[in-house]
Amino acid sequence: MTTRNLEHLLRPRSVAVFGASNQPDSIGHTVIRNLLAAGFCGTIMPVNPRYKAVAGVLTYPDVAGLPETPDLAIIATPPATVPGLVADLGERGTRAAVVLTAGLERERDGAGRRLDHAMLAAARPYLLRILGPNATGIMIPGVGLNASYVHTAPLGGSLAFVSEAGGLVTAVLDYAASSGIGFSHFISVGSAADVDFGDILDVLGSEPNTSAILLYMESLRNARKFMSAARAAARIKPVLVVKANRSTAHHPATAFHATRLAEPDAVFHAAMRRAGILRVDTIADLFGAVETLGRARPLVGEGLTIVTNGRSPGVVATDALAHGGGRLAKLADATRGQLAEVLPDTWDGENPIDMEENASPDRHVAVLEIVLDDPATDAVLFIHEPVAVVDSEDVARALVEVAAHARRTFLACWLGRQSVGEARRVFAEAGIATYDSPEAAVQAFLQMVGYRRSQHALMQTPTSAPDASVADGARARRLIAAALAEGSQTQTVQGQQAEEILACYGLCFGDAPAVSRPEQLFMGAATDSTFGPVIVFGQGGAAIEAINDFSVALPPLNMVLAERQVLRTRVSRLLVESSTQSAATMSGLCLALVQIAQAVADLPEMVELDLNPVWVTESGVVAAGARMRLAPAAVTGPERLAIRPYPGDLEERVTVLGRPVVLRPIRPEDAPQHTELFNRLSPEDVRYRFFTLMRQLAQSELARFTQIDYDREMAFIASADGPGGRPETLGVVRAVTDPDRVRAEFAVIVRSDLKGRGLGRMLLEKMIRYCRAAGVGRLVSEVLPDNRGMRALARSLGFLECESGDEDTIQLRLELSDPDAGTS
């Protein structure tokens, strides 16, 4: 299940509270009190056979006695009663429940089942969605819903907060209220037996009243669903996470370096980075990051210029920046010349820029206007310490207009309390992001850098990996089967036997006279209990774990993702900066990581892998040797990976117009050909496809079209060799499926000079077959009335034309449950 019936949870018209009570210290009493106080405009029905009224509201004895079927049920009754209540509610027609009751996983029913399992079994026939058990509740200020047992209601706002820990809810609400932070949704998922983080992300990602989503997580169960939902939501709005249990002991009983290095917190961090989520350390950082992202202009780069009226704060900020991996902007020569005219002769010409303690408001304005126009400066941090000779409020009022019209990111730090109180107020009223200390301001900047990198990662289009997809997986599987047949259930393989398996994926082995670089590297793979296979890269040699210079990434990888993994290590700087062939060095390293990732995706029996040491050669990389642990796989399909890899089994070779054509899923590497396809569309075909005239595809659109999540979207392209053997895309069909696979919206386009020759039909028929096999119920598309070619094609395949709700378009609809639909 995903978002099915969650509208009853998030937008209920009626609520029934089971376990409602007049006992002041009970959960049932607190829930009723909160519901009534929040101003919920729907029906509120307390349920308890011991009362005629609770909190002055007529009370009902049981489910059957309710005057109407509640959209949402709140359950605060003893554990043994919960499965039966859920069954009664499902039969009555209720489709959502919040189970506040704790302890269901510790108790069993008469048949010996755990009560939480019995509860889910009772809900399943009715598709009744359950938030909890052990939830604190759900609060949605916009609809006056406070179905929780917390002591205070949240302020209204645009942030959604989703927490696993019920005990944290009260503290977060206190913190938010004292800071004036409001929420669109405040949700406690509790034990997340049914509705989990992935489900909530799918709903809130498209919620128009939610500007950012904040998560507090202690654990994660369904990593595949979470990653799919998170990647979709993070493309639309900021998603931030605090993860508890970071220091969980990790001492695996293994001799493999990759497994010992890939400890759970490092893997979780890699997964959040891959999903486009910004991870922060504390709840305070979470809200601080939201304020920064909400108030400050988005970063266009990562160079920071620090302007201060005191040397020491500038030094503190610089140290914090260096410690966090940030960088100071290198001021342009023209900027230095302009600054020299307005600053004292004591200025050393460097960044940070010290205006000195006696800097007047006019000097502040002059310096900041110059710096904000500096081409190398992407963000400015202004730090002011109070001095006797200059009034801080005067400085603040002078700078408000400068900050308001800045084309760069502007952050401010007012040191002190009482003496700068009015200056803070002036900046706060102007909506300028302001911090208490240089360290806090730098941390906010680094969070912006992290968020920018995660968003940039979602939008980049990779280059092709030369022959990366050419692998002899069948031979590798035969070798693995033979190795497992030789010994016990788990087999450690090394030497020639391991090298032969990896050679099937293009990896090379040799000795150190063959290398051109002396640096020893490490490459490997491990299996995380939550996210499945992971790839490890870093500095190698005998002391690899003591050196602690490594990075973790989730497969599948492409050249861009592999390059990012390499660049997250310290050894990468040594490799690139000292190499006369840095591009070739990086390409070789990335290709090897892509090959390892492909092997890991293809070979579920390979659960651990060490390549140590690995060297860079003139023709790529070479490993001294390999060691791997093999074990029979319980799950052999792509479900074992947190991110679905490229579905190569969907490739199909056909002949079109007398030339061989491959119909296959789109890949990120297809971006250049996708741009060329767009450029070869007539203006009329562009209007038919996009409902507007577009001159070119924006980078963000290109990334969205080519970097798809195969779990919830599919695009098949028709690819053929063009002039000079260069591949070209002749057409594409795309379908985006809702999380419940009720329907998929499709679009198809063929290069304008190839229309009318059967290619569009071939693509659409392939998509129909795919969607039917994937269990999608209905295929729909909105088309312009004058798009007669598309309408005729659709009719010939059994589509019906229906009203779309928009007078400017027609809906094409095909019910895929009809086995004859979509055939000629």
Image: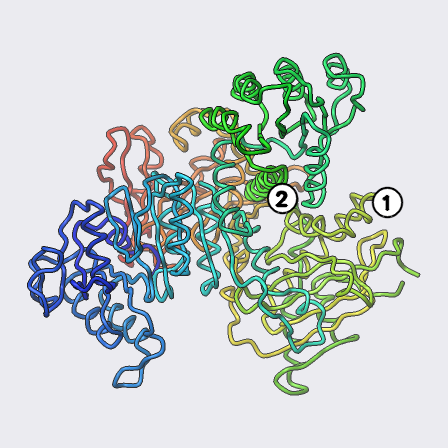
Q: Can residue 769 be seen in this view?
A: no
Image vertical order of residue 805 relative to residue 621, above or below: above
Q: How crowded is mark 1: few (under 14 residues within 10 Å), some or many (20 or more)?
A: few
Give the side of residue 99 with respect to residue 490, left or right: left
Which residue sits furthest front?
Answer: 388
**x%, y% of residue 660?**
57, 48
Q: How crowded is mark 2: few (under 14 residues within 10 Å), some or many (20 or more)?
A: many
Which residue sits furthest right?
Answer: 513
Q: Compare marks 1 and 2 and give the one earlier in the sequence.
A: 2
Give the camera-side residue of 369 and 89.
Answer: 369
The Cα atoms of the two marked residues, 1 and 2, are separated by 25 Å
- Residue 819 appears in which quarter of the rendering? bottom left
Give the camera-side residue of 665 and 328.
Answer: 328
**x%, y% of residue 220?**
47, 63
Residue in the image at 32% along x and 66% along y: 133
Q: What residue type is labelled 1?
A: Ser
**x%, y% of residue 576?**
80, 45
Callout 1 secondary element: loop
For mark 1, what is the residue? Answer: 578
Give the side of residue 62 with respect to residue 594, left or right: left
Q: What residue type is labelled 2?
A: Pro
Give the side of residue 480 with respect to residue 787, left or right: right
Residue 462's disc is 2
